[in-house]
Image (cartoon, rainbow, N blue to C red):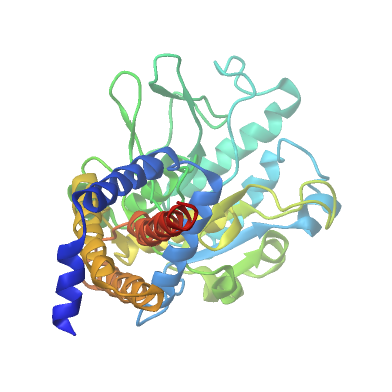
């Protein structure tokens, strides 16, 4: 049987191996072109979710608690469905949470100035509540770190600039951190520092939170990921059931009871109301993630947990990925060349694909490395299809000829 397999491999023409090489090159080109395609991204997310679901220990929130502004607070409460969100309400939340002794308070609410240059920094109608928020910020930051959201804009020359925020002032309290809240196109990647025009560094929101909580962890992550964002694992929203509170509940609960839920943990304040009206339209600030459409505050919480629990994996270098693609494709090409019929070819594809999945699983959960393997899988499918088409074409030509 081995002799028959070797005979079939040796019998293949140079044209056969040339076609294999062309398919390999074509697959790599197509993968590069589809890198930012939404459908392709969804396929990557599904495979990534599958790999993470096979982890020996499913991740749960270990460090974070979410305080969510939901429909009741936003549409029927004192917030009155207003945009911008009332700064005085945020001031009350800050003070109430501060009494419960959290380790860090982070505010995932868009606080950019209504004018790009920040002059004036806030509309006069909202100046009193802005001043109340800034006063509360100073009070709380004197006792524990507070992380605020920043936004950035892309300049015409390709550089980035931080936009002014309503909390900006010449005397920013020492305990106040801020980080940009824009997410990467590929939300599997944990965002890190961004270099601004002029050379200054701006932390991502999750990075600023971890830096305020445990700075030594950020130092290790930065040392391991010099030029690229690392991959991070995801915690499903349902796992936060016991680790989230509504903003209304926080304001109604006594400080003593609140301590049982948030003391010594990171508290993230964010929004989860529906965009159009109470219970109408999508939830605000939704992002495509490996777990489907997820509110931004959950995404940031996932990044924080991944960083703190060291569930971040440096991506494999492009050269390493290409080398794996080439080696795998050569192996598959040889295996398919020796296969005598369609069932044997299918067996080769399934066997090699399963082996590579197992290899990637081992890398992800033991070596801390993640290698995107959809390109090899596409090549595995494309090659036998092309061979079958050529085979049928040859049969048709032989019949008619």
Residue 106 visible, this angle? no
Q: Residue, x 24% and y 52% (percent of image)?
A: 321
Q: Looking at the picture, tell me which residue is in the foreground, 83 or 235.
A: 235
The answer to whether 61 appears left or right of 315 in the picture is right
176, above or below 231, in the image: above
Give the position of the N terminus as an image quadrant.
bottom left
Q: Looking at the picture, tell me which residue is in the foreground, 163 or 393.
A: 393
The image position of residue 307, as x and y in percent, is 34, 59
State the residue lying farthest toward the front: 401
The answer to whether 255 appears left or right of 14 in the picture is right
Q: How many marks?
A: 0
Q: Looking at the picture, tell me which residue is in the foreground, 188 or 169.
A: 188
The image position of residue 127, as x and y in percent, is 68, 27
173, above or below 221, in the image: above
346, above or below 143, in the image: below
245, above or below 16, in the image: below
The answer to whether 212 appears left or right of 359 in the picture is right
Residue 84 visible, this angle? yes
The image position of residue 64, as x and y in percent, is 47, 65
């Amino acid at each position: 049987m081995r002799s028959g397999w070797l005979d079939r491999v040796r019998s293949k023409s140079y044209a056969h191996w040339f076609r294999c090489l062309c398919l390999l090159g074509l697959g790599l080109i197509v993968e590069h072109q589809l890198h930012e395609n939404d459908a392709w991204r969804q396929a990557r997310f599904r495979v990534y979710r599958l790999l993470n679901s096979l982890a020996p220990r499913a991740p749960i929130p270990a460090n974070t608690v979410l305080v969510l502004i939901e429909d009741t607070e936003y549409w029927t409460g004192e917030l009155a469905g207003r945009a911008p969100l009332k700064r005085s309400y945020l001031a009350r939340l800050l003070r109430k949470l501060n009494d419960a002794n959290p380790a860090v308070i982070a505010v995932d609410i868009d606080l950019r100035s209504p004018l790009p240059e920040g002059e004036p920094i806030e509309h006069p109608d909202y100046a009193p509540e802005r001043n109340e928020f800034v006063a509360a910020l100073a009070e709380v930051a004197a006792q524990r770190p507070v992380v605020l959201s920043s936004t950035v804009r892309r300049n015409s020359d390709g550089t980035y600039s931080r936009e002014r925020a309503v909390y900006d002032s010449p005397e920013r309290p020492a305990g106040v951190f801020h980080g940009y809240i824009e997410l990467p196109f590929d939300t599997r990647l944990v965002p890190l520092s961004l270099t601004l025009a002029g050379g200054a560094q701006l932390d991502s929101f999750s990075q600023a939170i971890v830096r305020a909580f445990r700075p030594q962890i950020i130092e290790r992550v930065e040392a391991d990921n010099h030029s690229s964002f690392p991959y991070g694992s995801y915690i499903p929203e349902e796992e936060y059931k016991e680790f989230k509170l509504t903003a209304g509940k926080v304001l109604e609960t006594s400080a003593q009871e609140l301590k049982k839920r948030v003391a010594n943990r990171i508290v993230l304040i964010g929004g989860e109301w529906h965009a159009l009206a109470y219970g109408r339209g999508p939830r605000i600030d939704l992002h495509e993630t490996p777990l489907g459409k997820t509110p931004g505050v959950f995404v940031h919480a996932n990044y924080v947990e991944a960083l703190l629990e060291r569930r971040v994996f440096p991506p494999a270098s492009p050269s390493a990925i290409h080398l794996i693609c080439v080696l795998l494709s050569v192996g598959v090409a040889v295996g398919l060349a020796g296969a005598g019929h369609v069932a044997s070819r299918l067996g080769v594809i399934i066997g090699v694909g399963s082996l590579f999945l197992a290899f990637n699983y081992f890398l992800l959960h033991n070596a801390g490395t993640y290698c995107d393997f959809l390109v090899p899988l596409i090549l595995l499918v494309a090659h036998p299809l092309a061979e079958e088409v050529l085979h049928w074409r040859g049969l048709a030509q032989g019949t008619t000829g």
